[in-house]
Amino acid sequence: MSEVNQALALIESGGDNLKVMITLEVLHMSILVTGGAGVIGATVVKQLVAHGAEVVVFDLRDDRSLLGNVEVPIECGDICDKSLLVRVMRCYGVEKIVHLAAVMPDWAQENPFEASRINTWGLVIVLEAAREAGIARTVFTSSKAVIGRVAGPHMHPDYAPVSEEIGTHPYNVYGATKLAAEVLGKQLALESGLDLTVLRLASTYGPGKTVRHGKVGILSAIIEGAFRGESVRLPSGADLRNDFLYCKDIAQAVIKALAAPHTGFHLCHIGSGRLASLTDFVIAVRRGIPYADIEIGAGLDYGGGAGQYFRMDIQAARDILGYDPEYDVEKGVADYVQTISSQAEV
Ligand SMILES: NC(=O)c1ccc[n+]([C@@H]2O[C@H](COP(=O)([O-])OP(=O)(O)OC[C@H]3O[C@@H](n4cnc5c(N)ncnc54)[C@H](O)[C@@H]3O)[C@@H](O)[C@H]2O)c1
C-alpha cells in the first residue's frame, strides 16, 4: 500500500497515528507558496520543507530574511501575472498551491483599487492558472476581517465562539477584498471542480509581523519592541480578551488542508482554540524577555473598536482538517522569542 493510501486508510479508520500520517501525503509533493516571503508564508514554507515537500515561493519580493537557512527558490512576480504563474507551476511540476500573497489593511485602505486587484483578483487568477496547469487543490488564507464586528453573546464578557455560519459585515477595504475573494473563489471552485479550502484566520502573531502590518501587527510590535529594549506603552486594552493565533498553528492548518482527503469547497475558521487577555500576553512576553518594559492601560480596546475581539469556533477545522492547535500565548510567545533570538545571533 502506498504512503498516501496508508494515510487515507488511517484517516478513515480514525487511527491514533492520524496526525503523523496526515502529513505523509505532503512529503513528496511540489508545492507553490504565493506570498511565501511573508510572515505566515515563511512559517508555512519552513514547516513544509521540514515535512519533506519541495517548495517554490512566488512573491513580489526576493526577501529571504524570514526564511532563515531554508533554501527554496523564490520566483519574483505579481500575483496577477497569470502567464508567469502558469510557467512557474509547469516548470516546478507544482501539484498543490498555498495562496497567501496579499496586501495588509492599512495599505489596502489607502489603495483600494490595487488592494482589490491583489487580494480579490489575485485568487481568481491563481485559480485560473491552477486550472490551466492542471492543479486541483488550492488553500487560501482569508481573515476575521470578513466578519467585521460581532455583537451580543460573541462580545465581551461572554465571547461565545464564532462559527462559519455567522454573517459577514466587513468594515474596511481589506475585509471587503477578502470577502469578495471568498465568494468568487467558492463560485469558481464549484463551477470548475477545483478543490479550494478557505482558512479564515483569527488575530495572528509571528516573527516579522511589524513591517507591512500597521495596527494589526500590534502583538508582534509588543514582542519585538520589548526584545529591542524599547519601552512599549499602550493607553488601553489590558483587559480585552481575544483569540491569539500563532503562525505555527496556521502552518499546521495549511498543511492539514493540503493533505486532507476531502474534495470541493471548504471554509474553516482557524483560531487558537483559547481566549487570553492582553495582560496574559504581556506576562508571557515578560517571562521570555525579562528586561521587557511594557505598560498597557486598563480597558477593553487597544484601538480597534468594540466587537473586533472574538473567539473562533474551530470545530469545523477539527472535523474537516484534523486541526489541533498547539500554541497558547505562553507557548507561542516563548517560541517567538526563541526564533527572534536565534535570528539575532546570525
Ligand atoms: N487575522 C487575519 O485576518 C490574518 C492575519 C494575518 C494574515 N492573514 C492573511 O494571511 C496571508 C499572509 O499574511 P502575512 O501576515 O504573512 O502577510 P505578509 O505581508 O507578511 O505576507 C504577504 C506576502 O505577499 C506578498 N505580496 C503582496 N502583494 C503581492 C503581489 N501582488 N504579488 C505577489 N506577492 C505579493 C508580499 O510581498 C508578502 O511577502 C494573507 O493572505 C493575509 O490576508 C489574515
Image (cartoon, rainbow, N blue to C red):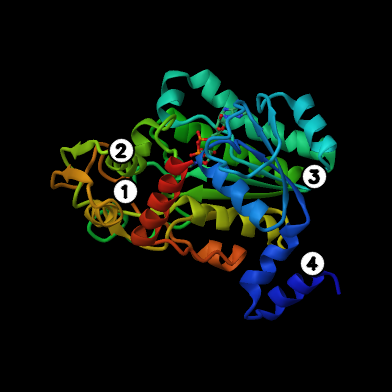
Cβ–Cβ below 8 Å for labels 3 and 4?
Answer: no
Residue type, label 2: Arg
What element does badge 4 sit on?
Answer: helix
Q: Which residue is mark 1?
A: 309
User: How many residues crowd mark 3 within 10 Å: few (<14), some (14–19), many (20+)?
Assistant: many
Q: Residue at x 38, y 61 (%)?
A: 331
Confirm if mark 1 falls within 8 A of ligand 1. no
Circle 4 or circle 2, nearest the eye: 2
- Residue at the disc numbered 3: 135
Is ligand 1 within 8 Å of the beta carbon of the residue shown at mark 3?
no
State the CA–CA distance, disc 3 to disc 4.
18 Å
Residue that appears at 17% across and 44% down: 296
Among numbered discs 4 and 2, the one appearing first in the sequence: 4
Earlier-in-chain disc, 2 versus 3: 3
Q: Is residue 205 visible?
A: no
Q: Is residue 157 above or below residue 82?
A: below
* Residue under pointer 4: 4
Q: Name the kind of residue labelled 1 in the image.
A: Tyr
